[in-house]
Image (spheres, rainbow, N blue to C red):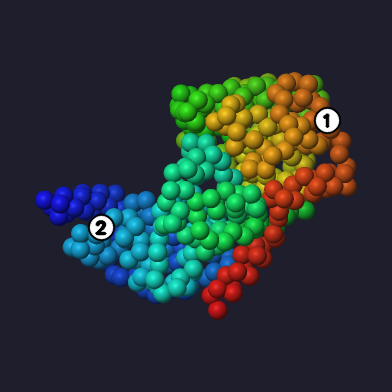
Amino acid sequence: MKKINIFIKNLINFFKIIIYADYSFSYPSKKKVLLFDDNLEIFLRKYIPMSNYTILFSKYKKYNFLILVKLLIQLKLNSLNYFNEFINYVRPKIIITFSDNYQIFYKIKPSYGSKKIFIQAAYRTATREDIFYHTNFLKKQKSLNFVDYMLVFNKRVGQEYKKFINGEYKEIGSFKSNFFKISKAKKKYDILFISVWRDEPPDHMQTDTVSRNTINTAQTKLLIHLKNYCLKNNRHITIYGKYYNKSESLKEREFFSKIFKGTKWNFLTNDRMKTYKFCDEAKLIVSTNSTLGYEALARGSKVAIFNIMNFDKSTKSKNFCWPYKVKKKGPFWTSTLSQNSCNELIDKLSNFNKKNWKKNNHENMKKVLSFDENNKKFSSLIKKLIN
């Protein structure tokens, strides 16, 4: 009876894959490098020639039909077995992923001495939608979790990962930001606001106690203060959107148009390959808890941080610089949401000269996020492991 149940479960998984995925009909060839999940693959090509790596797709995108059939016959068809079997055919020296928060990657057990590497793709928190929300659960499985090299934003994030993953962490800053050279072009955006709008229902819960509506309300209050500041001081604001998909971007633009009607403002649809250029060319950037805000700081941009997304104990990790602890107010950040605090911070940063800004930025951000131009640390590690 048990074998029948296993067979039925495997058969259901098999047909789910057939219905939802594309598939190849030849066994994967051997490569030096395997990219687990195609997330952010475009950023890998600069450092590793496409001829040297293959992609192990996940999440019902593309599967190898022969491996699926083999595992089905053996009554071993599940995601982890499929990934391990695929890797055994490729026999890579290195397995890389940009999906650092994809838990199954920690459990992959490659044969032939392959080294596993994950690259942190965004700032991580302990809220419901993110990896550190599951820390206590994952601690119980720590003996199963192993990653040779965890390439992280900073030391404290590495320590958080070490609570439930065996392996070594290395601080590299943001791989995506490091990928792009800092633009020295003339500043063309007066104030650039980084959107944290999401295409989610207002009652969608971000934590057990905080909804999307709570976050939108806080963002809207800040935007109204910025609008008032711009009108009073004849400043121009540009919103940098979250979405590059046309339909979602139109919804996002509509959200901001209701707030900034009658103001000098502009909306930039998200463009992954121009994101950092936009930031480099801004006189002043305004951010709440966006990863891009941290990255812009590491690139030397003037950034006003409004640390306003910590509503209760469940959103503690939304605090600026978490897991590091910083004061509620600093040279370029505030935790107060008011017209006065907005005016004061924008005025102060606008009047910072280049030397003063560089000093304040370096003293406060050097531990939190550094800039490693062209990912020299990553390239050095890959060269060591692949040769």
Q: Residue at x 38, y 55 (%)?
A: 58
Q: Mark 1 sits on what residue?
A: 347
> How many numbered discs?
2
Q: Residue at x 47, y 28 (%)?
A: 208
Q: Is residue 249 above or below residue 168?
A: above
Marks 2 and 1, how far apart at CA: 60 Å
Residue 81 coordinates in the image, percent (x, y): 31, 60
Q: Considering depth in this image, is 293 or 130 the residue closer to the camera? A: 130
- Residue lying farthest to the left in this orientation: 1
**344 lies left or right of 103:** right
Q: Quadrant of residue 85?
A: bottom left
**65 lies left or right of 359:** left
Look at label 1 and name its amino acid: Asp
Q: Considering depth in this image, is 16 or 25 the residue closer to the camera? A: 16
Q: Residues within 10 Å of mark 2 (few under 14, many from 20)?
A: many
Secondary structure of residue under mark 2 = loop
State which quarter of the image contains the C terminus. Answer: bottom right
Look at label 2 and name its amino acid: Leu
Q: Considering depth in this image, is 306 or 4 the residue closer to the camera? A: 4
Q: Mark 2 sits on what residue?
A: 77
Residue 45 coordinates in the image, percent (x, y): 54, 65
Residue 166 coordinates in the image, percent (x, y): 51, 58
Q: Quadrant of residue 223?
A: top right
Q: Residue at x 74, y 34 (%)?
A: 327
Secondary structure of residue under mark 1 = helix
